[in-house]
Amino acid sequence: MAKLLSVNVGMPVDVSWQGRTVRTGAWKSPVPGRRMVRRLNVEGDGQGDLAGHGGEIRAVLVYQLQSYEYWRKRLGRDDLTFGMFGENFTVDGLPDDEVCIGDRYRIGEAEFEVTQPRVTCYRVGMRLGEPAMASLLVAHHRPGFYLRVITEGRVQAGDGITLVRRGPGELSVADTDALLYLPGRDPAKLRTALRVPALSPGWQQSFRELAAAGPPGPEPEAPGFRPMRVARIVPETADVSSIHLGTTDDTALPEGRPGQYLSLRLAVDGEAREIRSYSLSSAVPSEEGTYRISVKHEPRGKVSGYIHARLRTGDLVDVAGPRGTFVLEEGTGPVVLASAGIGVTPVLAMLHRLAATGDPRPLWWVHTAHDRAHHAFAAEARALLARLPHAHEHVYYTAQTPPPGDEHATRGRPTAASLTALGIPADADAYLCGPTAFMDDLGGYLRGHGLRPERIRTERFGTLAAVNPGIAATAPVRPHQPPGPRATGPLVTFSRSGLATPWSPARASLLELAEACDIPTRWSCRTGVCHTCVTPLVTGDVTYPTPPLELPAPGTVLVCCAAPAGEVVLDL
């Protein structure tokens, strides 16, 4: 019979790591006697990052004596004591390749259900002093697993562990972990995972996305810049102009998806090259065989100022794209296209696609502008909406009362009450683009109205919101050149941040270079497992000094373990 060898607890503490402060509950130690296990955790225990650990679905983490013995031999360590892998229960038995999702076990007075493998996270490596540990746990099929508390009760070291019920589908923890993190997925096991009710909602969603994506398609054209000619420049409002871009040899342009963007490389100050990304704002390509982007002249915008003041018809511009994942998906359900200001551009491209096909889906077009004079594409959008059988339009002017008779516009901003009054169905797919505050507010209203979070897609201007689990918040810093002498390696350009800097081999990864420049980054495992750090590669090639367990999709890079093979441009 399997046995509980140790009960380990620890409250979150602040730990210094790489010049930052990490709030973590990974430091756990054995405790004597009986401990009460309740719905959320073991008595005396806590988690520092509830987004990835803890909560009802992940109340108790289990790790095995046999895995401790394995790592002691593999790592040449004799200092690995119970609790060092962050587990609450150290057990003899219950191997990851035999325990299944949905298995139920009785330990002492309590009953538990297996819900998911351990979340790959850099903090287990930080605790052990082994930076690659998150990757090793997956690669060696020894992740450990989480339990949900079915019946609360007291437990203690020495308690026997009894299997009460086998999980449906008999999908092991090791197989479940491999399905998410390793290549060569078994479609049959993926289908089985989606039929296991006990599997945590987060893992279910990840598997639904993998199933929907299907097998990989043909590799797309390699990313990179090509010269394109400015065919037309059309003023839309006093501060917005549309740039139509065509090929230099009359060849057909690659078709993009509505919602994607182009990256432009411009010699703004003599030889200095600036890279900016702009959403496509019409059909992709348009009927005249060009791409159209629409650029707002920002008061202190270096590149937007150049485009408005100096770019002329006939000029050549280096262009890369189309690319981006904020795209209109196929479907039959209702659609909401919501924007503010120049954020209208990607959703306008989506509207063009819907109108071109006479899409029968119910559509809600919601836009916020300062006033009528600054309402770009007002007539164009209304004409497109008139071609759709089930379209609804509503415009908000923040600084002007609409003239009498304009039934589609009101003064103010969207509110929960006004969106409810529009009759937006709870099963709609929503696409939001505009300033961060606009999208945060509108997304919150829509979630409150009943839309599921995964149905609300957003496209943010500038840098993306950082994902740095457990890192203590600090005041934001404007991206800058890294400290120290200027390096001499290939140029690395972070296009969203508007920063270019040479690479230094002293950096372990592109992620570390971005962090040295205070560029907002997104990561979790830092070892090429979780793909949280996946970043579009606008142009160039990378190498992986530490190979990831699964390569990312073509045209993207895992910055946590990549280095440039030459000059690169990242959408970061």
Image (cartoon, rainbow, N blue to C red):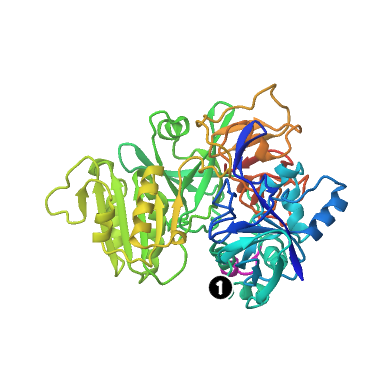
Q: Residue shown at 31%/67% (left/top)?
A: 388
Q: Nearer the viewer, residue 444 or 187?
A: 444
Q: Nearer the viewer, residue 444 or 502?
A: 444
Magenta includes 213? yes
- Please, is residue 456 above or below residue 248 in the view? below
Lateral position of residue 311 relative to residue 525, left or right: left
Lateral position of residue 301 relative to residue 97, left or right: left
Quadrant of the image containing the C terminus: top right
Counting from the top left corner in percent of width and height, residue 243 is at 43, 44
The tally of labels here is 1
Q: Residue shown at 31%/63% (left/top)?
A: 424
**Helix, strand or loop status at disc 1:** loop
Residue type of the residue flagged with mark 1: Pro
Provide the residue designation for mark 1.
197
Any part of residue 488 in sight: yes
Magenta includes 433? no
Lateral position of residue 76 relative to residue 8, left or right: right
Quadrant of the image containing the N terminus: bottom right
Q: Nearer the viewer, residue 467 or 73?
A: 73
The crowd level at tag 1 (other Cα within 10 Å; few <14, some 14-19, many 20+) is: some
Q: What's the magenta region?
A: 210-218
Counting from the top left corner in percent of width and height, residue 141 is at 76, 61
Counting from the top left corner in percent of width and height, residue 295 is at 41, 41
Counting from the top left corner in percent of width and height, residue 82 is at 75, 51
- Residue placed furthest toward the top: 485
Residue 90 in which image quadrant: bottom right
